[in-house]
Each structure stands twice: as structure tokens, then as C-alpha cells.
Image: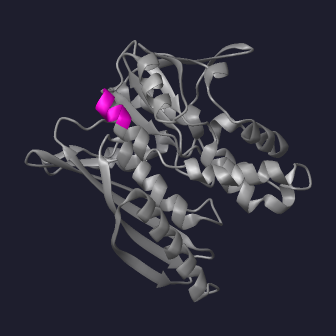
């Protein structure tokens, strides 16, 4: 099998199709593209999500907290805390575990959330550190946002920059290899993009603005996130490649490694659909957040216009970061 998430087709056929909902308080359960489970508690909802960190050798604690809280933010609610599971290999030292937890604590302090508990174990079941985080948030019933809420003629807004998380991971984990080909300042700039990995503020602004759908772009990159938003909504898309924001440093790194920046893991980048994308972009920019309208939600086909014409957007497969060979 390929490294990375299961394909959406496999996920649907092997896992989701075999599940059934047993409780009516579950408002949103597992589905392709949906980032969070949403549970009703009287006039409020509890929002939950979980994710592992497996692609990054460095900054696992920081990435883990922000990635999970980004999912909570994509539901338009505020994260409250995280549960942390660490599986350390036999070769690990106590300082390795401390480093991860120091990163977790720092990220939680930045977001003003709490570590709620978890589990820490040394095991021969893994050969490198595996971190899994569950994040919890809450909001008002009827005010949460889903991936599958997009409507025909919605503008598609992309915040941040495509490939952001992948750029950070690669610049850290492949620094020694890349510095032989790229200027060290470029790589340092790429590493500093970690400061922009959170979209919690984006989610709050978009929720207050009133949007129809939100989806955090993770594995499969920005094209994968746009495809999943359309698929979850039962709609199509028409986007324009030249409107998708990508930093120059990302393009340079991806060129050197022969990978596609639009299919590269992109936490820090949110896909939003709403009926007035230009106004939302202005609101986000007023708050120091880059945002661009990249296309529209349509009835059916999923299309991207490139320099070579219109191309069908294919479902996300294994992320580009797993294709790196050095």
C-alpha cells in the first residue's frame, strides 16, 4: 500500500459504508471531506477531531496542535483543548518526549487552550515517534459550519498559501539536502512559515461573516481540499490555477524535489465558500490574512483552468510529501 491517507474511494467503501449512526445527538459523523464530528448538547454542540503526525520529523508537537485546532476552526467554533497520545520507539530518549510536549504546551498557550489529558508510551510497535492528537471545541447549535455546505454559485475563497505545511516540513527535514541547491535564507524563510500554520482566526472571522462551507487543506493539498469540499457538498467546482496563492519559496522547493505544490499538504490554508467572496477577502485582509477568490461552486464537474486549458480535478491520493526521494 502507498504511504499516506487512504484514498477517498477506499475510505468510503471499506470504512464509512460499514458504519451506522446509533445516536440521534450525532449531527455530523464520518464522511469524505468532513473534518469534524459534531454532537448536540441541548442548545450547544461539541466538536471533535483527531489527527496523527507522521510525515514530519521535527516540530511534531507544534504541527499536531495547530492541525487539529485548524479542523475545529473549520467548523466555525472555538477550540478548547487537546488530548495527546505519544507512541515513542525503543530508541527514543526522555528528552525526545519532553521536546514534543514542550512544543505541544507552547502551541496550546498561543491558542489559549488546554492539554486535557492523553497517553504516553514507549513501544516496539513503532520505529519513530508517532503523535496523535484529539481536539475539542464547542459552539452554538445551528451556527456551526461543515465541509458539505457549499451552494451553487458560491465563491471559493482560499486563505493563506498552498503547500504551506509541506514547505515547513520539507525545509526542516531536508534542510541539508536542499541547501546544496537553494540559498539558506530561502530555506530559513520557509521554516519561518510555521508562524502562519494556524487558521483558528480565519475560522472565527469566516464564521462571524456567515459562510456556507469551510475545509482545512491538509493531505492532498489545496486541490484535494477543493475536491473534497465539492464532493461533500454534492457539487462541482471551476477554479483558476493562476489565482491560487502559492509562495515563491514553495515553488522553488517543489521544483527542486519534482513535486506538485497544489497537491502538497497545506495546513495553514483554508477553503471557504460563500456568496460574497470579495467582501470576505477584504475582511480577512483587514485582519492581516491573505485571501483570494479562486473560482466558483458549480452544479457538477470539477474543473481547473490551467495554462494548457481546462483539466478535470482528480480525487486526492497519497500526498506529494510521500513522493520525495533524496
Q: Is 254 situated left or right of 107 in this image? A: right
Q: Is 187 situated left or right of 316 in this image? A: right
The quadrant in which residue 85 appears is bottom left
The residue shown at (78%, 44%) is 253
Q: Is 274 situated left or right of 308 in this image? A: left
The range drawn in magenta is: 205-209
Could you tell me which quadrant the C terminus lies in? bottom right
The quadrant in which residue 320 appears is top right
Could you tell me which quadrant the N terminus lies in? bottom right
The residue shown at (56%, 46%) is 219
Colouring scheme applied when the structure was drawn:
one colour
Residue 230 visible (yes or no):
yes
Secondary structure of the magenta portion, mostly?
A: helix
**Above or below 266: residue 159:** above
**Above or below 231: residue 122:** below
Residue 27 lies, in percent from the top left, at 20, 42
How many numbered tags mark residues here? 0
Residue 225 lies, in percent from the top left, at 50, 35
Most extreme residue toward the front is: 286
The one nearer the camera, 96 or 28, is 96
Q: Is 58 situated left or right of 120 in this image? A: right
The residue shown at (67%, 33%) is 246
Residue 47 lies, in percent from the top left, at 27, 51
Residue 322 visible (yes or no):
no
Residue 95 colored magenta? no
The one nearer the camera, 146 or 106, is 106
The residue shown at (28%, 53%) is 137
**Above or below 247: residue 138:** below
Residue 302 lies, in percent from the top left, at 52, 20
Amino acid at each position: 500500500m502507498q504511504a499516506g491517507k487512504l484514498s477517498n474511494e477506499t475510505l468510503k467503501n471499506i470504512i464509512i459504508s460499514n458504519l451506522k449512526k446509533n445516536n440521534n445527538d450525532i449531527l455530523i459523523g464520518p464522511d469524505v471531506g468532513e473534518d469534524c464530528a459534531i454532537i448536540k448538547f441541548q442548545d450547544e454542540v461539541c466538536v471533535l477531531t483527531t489527527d496523527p503526525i507522521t510525515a514530519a520529523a521535527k516540530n511534531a508537537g507544534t504541527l499536531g496542535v495547530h492541525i487539529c485546532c485548524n479542523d475545529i476552526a473549520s467548523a466555525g467554533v472555538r477550540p478548547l483543548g487537546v488530548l495527546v497520545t505519544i507512541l515513542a520507539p525503543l530508541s527514543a530518549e526522555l528528552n525526545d518526549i519532553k521536546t514534543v510536549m514542550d512544543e505541544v504546551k507552547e502551541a496550546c498557550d498561543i491558542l489559549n487552550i488546554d492539554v486535557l489529558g492523553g497517553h504516553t508510551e514507549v513501544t516496539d510497535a513503532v520505529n519513530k515517534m508517532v503523535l496523535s492528537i484529539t481536539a475539542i471545541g464547542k459552539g452554538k447549535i445551528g451556527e456551526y459550519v461543515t465541509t458539505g455546505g457549499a451552494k451553487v454559485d458560491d465563491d471559493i475563497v482560499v486563505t493563506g498559501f498552498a503547500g504551506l505545511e509541506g514547505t515547513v516540513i520539507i525545509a526542516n527535514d531536508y534542510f541539508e539536502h536542499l541547501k546544496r541547491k537553494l540559498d539558506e535564507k530561502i530555506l530559513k524563510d520557509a521554516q519561518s512559515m510555521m508562524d502562519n500554520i494556524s487558521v483558528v482566526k480565519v475560522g472565527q472571522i469566516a464564521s462571524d461573516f456567515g459562510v456556507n462551507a469551510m475545509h482545512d487543506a491538509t493531505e492532498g493539498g489545496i486541490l484535494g481540499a477543493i475536491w473534497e469540499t465539492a464532493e461533500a457538498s454534492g457539487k462541482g467546482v471551476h477554479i483558476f490555477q493562476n489565482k491560487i496563492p502559492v509562495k515563491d519559496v514553495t515553488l522553488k522547493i517543489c521544483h527542486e524535489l519534482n513535486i506538485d505544490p497544489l497537491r502538497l499538504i497545506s495546513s495553514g490554508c483554508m477553503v471557504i465558500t460563500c456568496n460574497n467572496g470579495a467582501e470576505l477577502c477584504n475582511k480577512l485582509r483587514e485582519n492581516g490574512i491573505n485571501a483570494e477568490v479562486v473560482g466558483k461552486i458549480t452544479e457538477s464537474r470539477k474543473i481547473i483552468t490551467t495554462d494548457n486549458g481546462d483539466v478535470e480535478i482528480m480525487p486526492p491520493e497519497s500526498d506529494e510529501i510521500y513522493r520525495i526521494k533524496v
